[in-house]
Image (tube, rainbow, N blue to C red):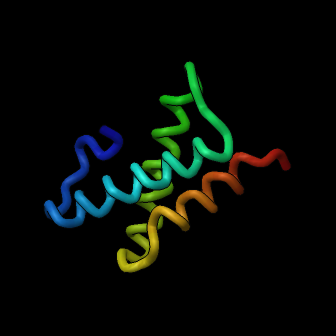
Amino acid sequence: MPFQGFVVEPADLAKLAGAFDAAWVAVNSVNTIGGQQQRRARARLATIILDLWREDPAQALSASAVERFLASDQPS
């Protein structure tokens, strides 16, 4: 569970978990992540979603998270 140890209201946790699940499916549809990289990628995606939620809980978390995740995954 990517949000383990994080204290929020049940409705917020459900929103975060739903956003994570949707974002993970979208990320994997662009570039399948497996093996050792999967655990790190899931943790990074969860961190992105939490950061976005803290910035603005009303925003479309999954879409914004996918955009930020893929942008940060590009070589400089």
Q: Residue at x 53, y 29 (%)?
A: 38
- Residue 75 as seen in the image, left or right of residue 55: right
Q: Quadrant of residue 59?
A: bottom left
User: Total number of numbered labels?
Assistant: 0
Residue 21 picture location, percent across and down: 40, 49
Foreground of the two, 34 or 9: 34
- Residue 61 as seen in the image, left or right of residue 65: left
Q: Residue at x 67, y 40 (%)?
A: 31
Q: Residue at x 30, y 46 (%)?
A: 3
Compared with residue 46, is residue 38 higher up or lower down, i.e. above or below? above
Foreground of the two, 36 or 23: 23
Compared with residue 55, is residue 70 higher up or lower down, i.e. above or below? above
Q: Where's the N terminus, which quadrant?
A: top left
Q: Quadrant of residue 12?
A: bottom left
Residue 2 picture location, percent across and down: 35, 41
Q: Residue at x 67, y 52 (%)?
A: 70
Residue furthest left in the image: 10
- Residue 5 as seen in the image, left or right of residue 62: left
- Residue 30 as seen in the image, left or right of residue 64: right
Compared with residue 56, is residue 30 higher up or lower down, i.e. above or below? above
Residue 6 picture location, percent across and down: 25, 50
Residue 17 picture location, percent across and down: 31, 53
Residue furthest front in the image: 29
